[in-house]
Image (cartoon, helix red, strand yellow):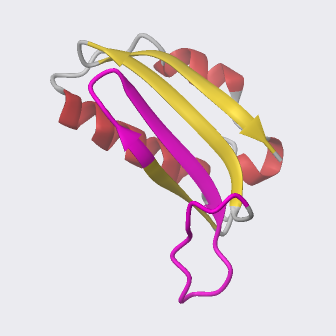
Amino acid sequence: MIEPVWYGGTNKSIIKKIVGKKFSDQASLLNFLTEFHELMLVGSGGKYIATSLSERVVTYNLVQINGSANTGSNSGDDVWLKIKVRTRKSRIVRYKEINRW
């Protein structure tokens, strides 16, 4: 079971389990990250927004959603957490919190 990010932050033991995971292609890796982040957000009122996508690095901002009409933004005031995921040959090689407020 994955602990929600709002409860205790990013669960380090879960992160250790996904680092090194190999995927059939980059699209499968990105789909996995999307679903992984959705699980961590249960009950949080937040949303991960991909801010940069490349073959070697994917970055996300976790923003707090204020009201149902707001879809989140990348402005510094809304960002609660930044994540950088390093990849190589469709494998997750590092998952790191860049900063946290």
Q: Quadrant of residue 41?
A: bottom right
Question: Residue 48 at x, y = what percent?
Answer: 53, 54
Q: Is residue 59 left or right of residue 91?
A: right
Question: Residue 93 at x, y = what percent?
Answer: 44, 12
Residue span colored magenta: 51-76
Q: Can I make out residue 1 in this image?
A: no
Q: Is residue 14 left or right of residue 19?
A: right
Q: Is residue 65 left or right of residue 86?
A: right
Residue drawn at x 43%, y 49% as measured from the top left: 50
Nearest the eye: 60 or 42: 60
The residue sitting at the front extreme is 75
Q: Is residue 66 above or below residue 101?
A: below
Question: Residue 61 at x, y = what percent?
Answer: 57, 49
The answer to if 19 sits in the magenta stretch is: no
Quadrant assignment for the N terminus: top right
Q: Is residue 92 above or below residue 35?
A: above
Nearest the eye: 54 or 10: 54
The answer to if 67 sits in the magenta stretch is: yes
Q: Can I make out residue 9 in this image?
A: yes
Residue drawn at x 67%, y 65% as measured from the top left: 43
